[in-house]
Amino acid sequence: MPLETTSPQNAIPTEEITLLGIREFLYGIILSVPILLLAMAPMFGLSVEAWIDPHINQFLQLILTSLVIATCGRSIVSRGIRSIATGNLNMFTLITIGVSAAYGFSLLATLLPTFFPDSFRNPKTGLVHTFFDAAAMIIVLVHLGQALESQARSKTGAELRSLVSLAPMTARVVLENGEHDVPLSTVHPGDHLRVRPGETIPVDGTLFDGASHVDESLLTGEPSPVEKKKGDEVIAGTKNGRGSFILLAEKTGSETLLSRIITLVGSAQRSKAPIQRMADSVASIFTPIVLAIALGTFTGWFFLGPQPRLAHAIVSSVSVLVIACPCAIGLATPMSIIVGIGRAASEGVLFKDAESLEALGQSKSLMIDKTGTITEGQPTVTDIVLFSNQSEEEILLLATAVELGSEHPLATAICQAARERNLEVLSNADTFLSTPGSGVQGTVSGKTIALGNEAFLKQQNVPASELNEFRRAADPLRASGKTITGVVVNSHVAGLFAVTDPVKQSAYTAIGQLKQLGLQITMLTG
């Protein structure tokens, strides 16, 4: 397989590499099927000799097996030869030795059948039994494992390509003479960049001027936008909300967190799980042992066996090498790892490395997030409590008129509640002021409206008796895990909204199934 660099772009497996591996495997399948038919048809009661001469049959197997080794098996044999040359014995060493022994013996048996005693030859045809089918299928099975690995890496690569596409191609640089769009590659640390509403943040940096809410679900999994103000960190690939701000670029290109994630996952695909490394370690010990046994077998038959001793010695030693060829390891080991990685990639889960996947299979406990994992990730208004003569619809309309200017998740929930009731806001707030961490206020049709937490309500000159009534209504709702937002109209508490993130219906089933697997489930949440 071709060498791969570790830059963010080249960390992604290309379709060309994947197609090359699949193409070689298909060549092997196409060439091996007739070999199996020619070699094994008699085992299924089919008389091959009736429609093809046995000598032609054997030469056809020779030609087809040679093509399998030259096309499908070229990369496998070259890796085996390299391992022998460097002394780094591994699974491919045994595969190469086994294939070479099977092919070499079969070549000798085909071209020089008289070299072998009569007992080795078929009494009807006079031909020596060959191992062309074994040599071909060993290569095809090992290549199947590599093709599956390449295909699974391609699936994960598609997820990585979607990460790369998150970074915009251009950025808007703020200069003394105005703002200009420039290619992202020309942005350097220290540049000031304008990020407009709805745009993707181009580089890592610090918010220099302005404020907004940013969707950081790419990094945290949290669906709710995060409030950003001057001095806060912003990350490339995350998406800006409805605000506009200027950021000071600090990390660009391959230094951004997004680029490092891409490089890390690309490296994970090339990494080996402990079980794969163990297979190579076993092979490094197993290979010399097999060679020693084969040499001992050859020596024993050559000096102690019946005549012709050389023929018996060759056949016996080749049998040892073919039987010891670890084609099952070459197929089963990568298949088990790669199927897991590919399945996870289709669900949007990227593993740090192959070892992490293997460790997951041995885990006894699972820690999961709450928002967006167990819950829907969309805060919803569940309760509306009134403290005045106004109806729920009137309170919702006034609150929505103010909250339309806010990006806070609670504002989104209140606006959604109004839409679900088919309420149409006739006029937006004439003024709007947001106090981060407390609440918002504005003027709607001459009325002063404020929405926020209890501390924020105190700042609106609300009478103490109304605050006490608000607290008595809010406490039971808070105790049940709901977030409370009070509504003040002209310095009087008019109502409150209780907001919660509902649990997914599928969460109950999923957690139940996980517990049946013997996992201990723990919820981690802020």
Image (tube, helix red, strand yellow):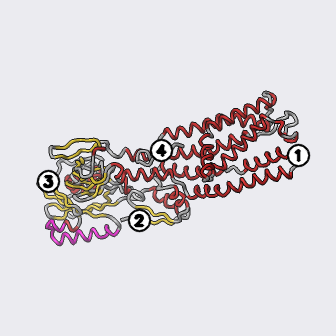
- Count the labels in the image: 4
Which is in the foreground here, disc 4 or disc 1? 1
Query: Please, is residue 516 above or below residue 58 in the view?
Result: below
Q: Which mark is residue 13?
A: 4
The three-letter code of the residue at mark 1 reads Gln
For disc 2, the neighbor class at 10 Å (few under 14, some 14 to 19, many from 20) is few
Which is in the foreground here, disc 2 or disc 4? 4
The three-letter code of the residue at mark 3 reads Thr
In front: 406, or 336? 336
Q: Residue at x 73, y 41 (%)?
A: 104
As measured in the structure, the alpha-carbon distance from the residue carrying label 4 to the one carrying label 1 is: 56 Å
Residue of label 3 = 431
* Residue 181: percent from left, percent from top: 24, 41
Magenta-span inclusion, residue 463:
yes
Range shown magenta:
457-479
Which tag, 4 or 1, sits closer to the chain's start? 4
The three-letter code of the residue at mark 4 reads Pro
- At mark 2, the secondary structure is strand
Residue of label 2 = 524
Which tag, 2 or 4, sits closer to the chain's start? 4
Residue of label 1 = 307
Quadrant where the N terminus sits is top right
Mainly helix, strand or loop, the magenta region? Answer: helix
Which tag, 1 or 3, sits closer to the chain's start? 1
As measured in the structure, the alpha-carbon distance from the residue carrying label 4 to the one carrying label 3 is: 53 Å
Magenta-span inclusion, residue 213:
no
